[in-house]
Image (cartoon, rainbow, N blue to C red):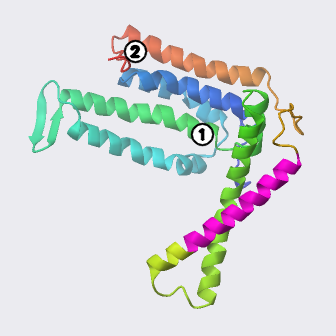
Amino acid sequence: MIPSTTAPRGPLARINPVAKLAAALLIALPLVVTVDWVSAVTALVLEVPIFLASGLRARAFWTRTLPVWVAAPLTAVTIALYGAPSGDTHVEWMLIHVTDGSLQLAAATFFRILAIALPGVVLFADVDPTDLADGLAQRAKLPARFVLGALGGMRLIGLLVSDWRELEAARRARGVADSGRIRRVLGMAFALVVLAIRRGSHLATAMEARAFGSDEPRTWARESPWGAREWALTGAGLAISATALAVTTATGHLNVILGG
């Protein structure tokens, strides 16, 4: 649950989650099949208006995207040190081989990670799982049984965390959690599995009683809206991809990695 003090309030806050998913996929697609820094930097620059329109405050943005900012340079450094050598050699020591090719590949990977991951994090910062499930079933036409089952599983993740804490507190209250850490963790894990199976059985019975296993078309309590804003966001994702490919092709840096 996102605190009200940091909840996004930008133009993208009320857009259908399926449109956000489509935009993120359209942006990522050309970056996945190509490896060059020009297309990645172009896409990253064009994504800035999306970041601003998300409504995330600066602190929330940096907090949510921190893992991306950590993973990108670490991956780039690894590729720079151990990537496929080509061109002039700058450093060579045991397995470390820094060359012009490895440095270019490291830079391309760094910007690709940012350009692919940041839109996904920002666009889904305020997405409610129920709204996403409604959109996937009503707009993306995914099977309702699969979508609702996945939604139920996601809703139970928080309960599993709560169960673990309650089990730990109960064991400490009985004085059986002060020694044998490995045995304690295994015992709690087994108890948690038993609780999860029981809760899953109850949930399955309740869903079956409400005809969730029927092959008849379902009705929905809430309609998943789709209008001009959703088309605009999807079009923006497509435009970013097309522009990135056009720029890298025009500059001669296009490097497709599929089919090689």
User: In the image, what residue type sits under mark 2?
Assistant: Thr
- Along the horizontal axis of the image, is 85 left or right of 217? left
Label 2 Cα crowd, 10 Å radius (few <14 / some 14-19 / many 20+): many
Is residue 202 covered in magenta? yes
Identify the residue at horizontal 36%, vertical 11% (top origin).
Answer: 251
**Image x and y of residue 223, in percent:** 86, 33
Task: Name the dominant secondary structure of the magenta segment.
Answer: helix
Which of the 4 quarters of the picture holds residue 3? bottom right
Quadrant assignment for the N terminus: bottom right
N-terminal-most mark, 1 or 2: 1
30 and 58: which is toward the camera: 30
Which of the 4 quarters of the picture holds residue 240? top right
Identify the residue at horizontal 15%, vertical 37% (top origin).
Answer: 97
206 and 236: which is toward the camera: 206
- Magenta span: 188-210
Q: Is residue 98 above or below residue 251?
A: below
Q: Is residue 131 above or below residue 26?
A: below
Element class at badge 1: helix
Element class at badge 2: helix
- Which residue matches tag 2? 248
- Along the horizontal axis of the image, is 85 left or right of 40? left
Outermost residue to the bottom: 175
Tell me whether the residue at label 1 lies in contact with that at label 2, contact meaning CB atoms closer than 8 angstroms. Answer: no
Identify the mark at residue 89; answer none if there is no mark. Answer: none
- Which residue matches tag 1? 122
